[in-house]
Image (spheres, rainbow, N blue to C red):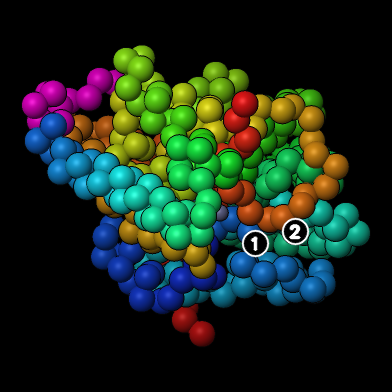
Amino acid sequence: MYIDPHIHMVSRTTDDYQRMALAGCVAITEPAFWAGYDRSSAQGFVDYFRLLTDTEPRRAAQFGIRHHTWLCINPKESEDLGLAREVLAEIPKFLDRPNVLGIGEIGLNKNSRNELIVLEEHIALAKSRGLLILVHTPHLEDKLKGTRLIMDAIMAQGIDPGRVLIDHVEEHTVRLVLDRGFWAGMTLYPDTKCTPQRAADIFEMHGTDRLWINSAADWGVSDPLAVPKCREEMRRRGHLEAVIQRVSFDNPKKFLSQSGRFEVSCSCPTPR
Amino acid sequence: MATPMRVSEIIDQYFLEHRAKTLDLAAFLDRHDRAAKAEGLASAEASKDVRVRALLRALDLLRDGHPERARRILELWSDHSTAPIPAAPMKGAIGAVELP
Ligand SMILES: [Zn+2]
């Protein structure tokens, strides 16, 4: 039994849900993100939020998987401040939907000034509503700088770091994140981010406290079964079953349960 | 949390995979140099491309005998500036920065 706490099912097929259920997935969380193209209006995001809060939970329920979500305008579409603020104004209308856990995945992409302004406005929204935050950190050469800027922006607003998960950490950012009291996520992604082997190495070097794994599977080359594959890698190395369960079930459950809305047991399927 | 594997087990389990990755890297540099020769451009060792330069510099770190090679390579390839940039020039990232 495992939780994939970061996956973009909007880009995946129903067969993927079936395979994930067969592999032991009981709950997922799907942060709002870039869809591989820029939306042309705020209405495009409103439709996306409807999908995240209505369509996907139903599709997941058919396979006994509990679906949760996080809402925001992602950093890749935050360069246009006007559009970002229009979308930000729509988000509160969806925050009371039962599967919404908080604000995410917010953060930075190219570490630009406008991205930072939009990030700060999302942090303020999360603070005013007492919501959890899920953070996307930039890719490749931009990750180290972006991770530092994001943590500073969050701390500047007096947010409890224990209610924030900083995702896509790698060997050069994991310690910075954990040492400041945040939760950290490792993304198992081919070519960029972590392989299952490197994620297992990072657990061995930095322990399992406040650290989880996810697939972040989306429209790109990615793997919706990455979490069970990392569990298998740890098992192959001889790690205890309790440790494997901690990083792929107990830890995400502990962090996500702070929302008061996270459920692992699935209600009856209501396909439509 | 230490690794539960012994050194001999680590080698047995992972050697072939990393042997293959080493050959991939060698073949990539060979491919680069064949194309460079045909185009009259510099070989990988003298490349002006930031990514090729960054890759070769990382290979030096692999054999310096110090721990945490993965962390140090990622730091080598990272942008170490601290101020936000005026505007995002593109959506993606290339994987390395210009090294001195
Ligand atoms: Zn994501």
Q: Ligand 1 is found in which quarter of the picture?
A: bottom right
The amino acid at mark 2 is Glu
A213 or B99: which is nearer to us?
B99
Q: Are marks 2 and 1 on the same chain?
A: yes
- Is the residue at mark 2 in contact range of ligand 1, meaning its CB lies under 8 Å from it? no
Question: Is residue B72 depicted above or below A166 in this figure?
Answer: above
Residue at figure coordinates x 81%, y 61% from the top left? A87
| Three-letter amino acid code of the residue under disc 1 | Trp
Disc 2: which chain?
A
Give residue B9's position: percent from left, percent from top: 10, 30
Name the mark on residue A77: 2
Q: Quadrant of the N terminus of chain B?
A: top left
Q: Which residues are magenta?
A: B1-10
What SS does tag 1 mark?
loop
Q: From the viewer's perspective, is B57 left or right of A161? A: left
Specify the subunit that label 1 lies on: A
Q: Position of residue A123 (x, y in %)?
A: 76, 40
Q: Secondary structure at mark 2?
A: helix
Residue at x-position 73% and y-position 41%: A111
- Check residue B5 for magenta coloring: yes
User: Going from the N terminus, do you reach mark 2 or mark 1 first?
Assistant: 1
Does the rendering let one see residue A174? Answer: no
From the image, give the main secondary structure of the stretch colored magenta: loop
Q: Residue under label 1, please give it.
A: A34
Q: Are marks 2 and 1 in contact (CB under 8 Å)?
A: yes
Q: Look at the picture and state if A255 lies above or below A162.
A: below
The reply to whether the magenta stretch includes residue A202 is no
